[in-house]
Image (cartoon, rainbow, N blue to C red):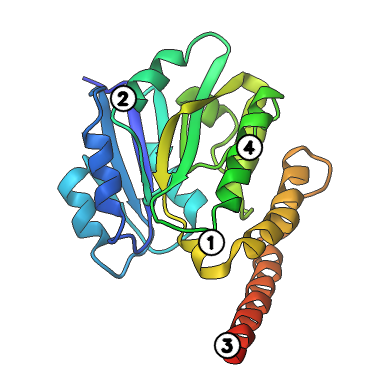
Amino acid sequence: MRPLVSVIVPALNEEKYLERCLRSIRDQTFEDFELIVCDNGSTDRTVEVARKYADRVIVERKKGRAHARNRGVKIARGEILMFLDADVMVPPNFLKKAIGLIRGPVIGVTCSLHPLETSKKLFPIVLSNLLVRLSTKLRFPLIPTDCLIVRKDVCESIGGFNERVEREDLDFSLRARRHGIFLYLSDFQAKTSLRRVIKYGWAHEICHALTSDSREILQALGIIKYGSENRQKLIWAKKLHEFDSVNEQKTFHI
């Protein structure tokens, strides 16, 4: 019997967080789902952890998040897809609530994100929640795939995730909006890691949003053409190097 929902979790060296993520799925009150983990070339215990909880585990060399999600979609048997990042935990009644809302014009559901760690660097996640909530209300969804549920037929009709861009998640939700609306559940809180914010600082994340994210939003809307994958990687690698240099200088002076 085919499951109604396919939960797809891409992972790369996520042994620290993956078990909590997969356990949160297995603890759902809604049980009609399959759990797929797409390993993207991990060198730690990620695959070992995945096999304890997942129904199917795809193991391949590193090809990026978009490719990993697309591989999951290809083998998914459910009518509805749930994309979940490996460092995210969802409340036990989330699937039941979200699946019940996908009908008529509603093609997808997401929820608010809150930090796993105790940190004062909350500005990026607060800003992200505000942006997702506002954009879904305006029918201009800018939704990260930390936690996203969407109909499989919609995913297939737009060709899945664009593997040429860095923010394939925002690109995906913008292209999918032509098929219906997304709902934002503010009363459901998924827990996610702030490791990137803690490592690079909130200024780094905001800079990322104002550069790479804004460019790819314009690309998804067809306002500008998609650039080459290598060019985008070089641009962002340069920005990361600049921030790392600044952080090293600050540490030296302290």
Disc marking residue 197: 1
Q: Earlier in the sequence, mark 1 or mark 4?
A: 4
Label 3: which residue?
Answer: 254
Q: Report the amino acid beneath label 1.
A: Val
| Secondary structure category for the residue under label 2 | loop
Closer to viewer: mark 3 or mark 4 = 3
Q: Which of marks 1 and 3 is nearer the N terminus?
A: 1
Up-down relation of residue 19 to residue 151 (above or below): below
Question: Which image quadrant for residue 15?
Answer: bottom left
Where's the N terminus, which quadrant?
top left
Label 4: which residue?
Answer: 130
Up-down relation of residue 108 to residue 190 (above or below): above
Q: Rounded to the nearest whole Å, what is the CA distance between mark 2 and mark 4? A: 23 Å
Q: How crowded is mark 3: few (under 14 residues within 10 Å), some or many (20 or more)?
A: few
Q: Rounded to the nearest whole Å, what is the CA distance between mark 3 and mark 2? A: 46 Å
Question: Which image quadrant for residue 24?
Answer: top left
Where's the C terminus, which quadrant?
bottom right
